[in-house]
Image (tube, grey):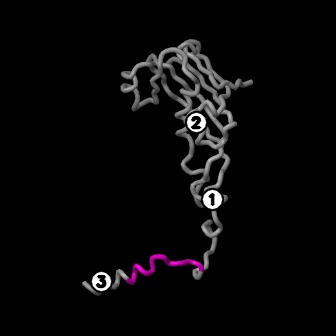
Amino acid sequence: MARSDKRASLDPHDVAEHAGSWVGRVPVSAFERLAPLIGKPDAEVEVELTFEPDGNGLVRVSGVVCVDAVLECQRCLEDVSQKIVADLDLRLTVSEKKLTELMPALDVMVIDAGPIPIVEIVEDDLIMSIPARVCATELDCPNAPRALSLGADVDEDDTSRPFAGLRALKNLNREEC
């Protein structure tokens, strides 16, 4: 049974020494930057993390974080329910020097020594996992206006040609030259 804890925190170094894990739920309201983006203030973020030492003397954090969200489709502007899933595989360090050494090859986060909130570990990855497009493709948008849907016929008479007058101006300018 997963626990729900807004203030969940742990010392990653202590947990990694025992190859431990943290499984639980954190209310979306605990995520200052994520909460306004997902449209469900009462949702809970499901977290499954494992902590272990890596070969560089850092703490390796791996796992999965997910939340059910309501996102706005940028094509039809309708709300669409979607599950946001973030796979984590990052290293924690207290040294800025280690960050610059390892950053191109590994995902590294600089933390303060001692306990840190679970929210701090997972929030960035969740935000980066929010899709740019809610519908799989713009052509398959279930809420798209009918005339713009793939395969819909549009009568030629129903369309306007807003730039038709530009052709006449363009041709007029050529005659003057």
Sequence-wise, the earlier of marks 2 and 1 is: 2
Magenta stretch: residue 59 in it?
Answer: no
The residue where tag 2 is placed is 86
Looking at the picture, how far across and down is residue 100, in whole percent?
37, 26
Taking depth in this image into account, of 35 and 148 the one nearest to the observer is 35
Residue stretch in magenta: 158-168
Taking depth in this image into account, of 99 and 17 the one nearest to the observer is 99
Taking depth in this image into account, of 150 and 11 the one nearest to the observer is 11
Sequence-wise, the earlier of marks 1 and 3 is: 1
Quick check: 97 above or below 133? above
The residue where tag 1 is placed is 140
State yes or no: discs 2 and 1 in contact (Cβ < 8 Å). no
The residue where tag 3 is placed is 174
The N terminus sits in image quarter: top right
State how far apart marks 2 and 3 are (Cα): 58 Å
User: Which SS class for mark 1?
Assistant: helix
